[in-house]
Image (spheres, rainbow, N blue to C red):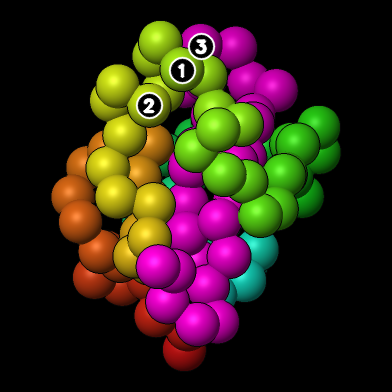
Amino acid sequence: MMNAGLTTYWIQSPVPHAPLGFGVTARSRDDAIRMIHVLGYGRYLPDGLAGVQVAEGVTVAQLDQPHVIANMGPIVVRGMWYPFVSVGAPRGAEEH
């Protein structure tokens, strides 16, 4: 069961050679983007997020079955689950 106040996001970058997408469970879209940056993937998100596609409320059934699901972390806790780095939100992802 998902924690209250969290939303799943699938974020796709227009930048060449970026990951297939970023799967993030976060408090908000800004929270999701912040986690991507804190984890070192910000280079794949252009300034102003031009061309970035964001799907909100994604489910496991909507994801790429052969690759993403086989390589993702838990979707029910706050953090980036694809590409999977670690369980939970990274240090530095809190709003200031």
Q: Which mark is residue 65?
A: 1
* 2 or 56, nearer to the observer: 2
- Given residues 21 and 93, the one toward you in this image is 21
Query: Of tags 2 and 3, which is closer to the observer?
Result: 2
Q: CA distance from mark 2 to mark 3?
A: 20 Å
Q: Residues within 10 Å of mark 2 (few under 14, many from 20)?
A: some
Per the rendering, the mark at residue 69 is 2
Secondary structure of the residue carrying numbered label 1: loop
Disc 1 to disc 2, C-alpha distance: 5 Å
Circle 3 crowding by C-alpha within 10 Å: few under 14, some 14–19, many from 20 = few
Q: Earlier in the sequence, mark 2 or mark 3?
A: 3
Residue 78: image location, x then y, percent = 38, 67
Question: Magenta stretch?
Answer: 1-26
Amino acid identity at mark 2: Ile
* Few, some or many residues within 10 Å of mark 1 (<14, 14–19, 20+): few
Tags 1 and 2 touching, CB below 8 Å:
yes
Q: For residue 70, what is the image quadrant?
A: top left
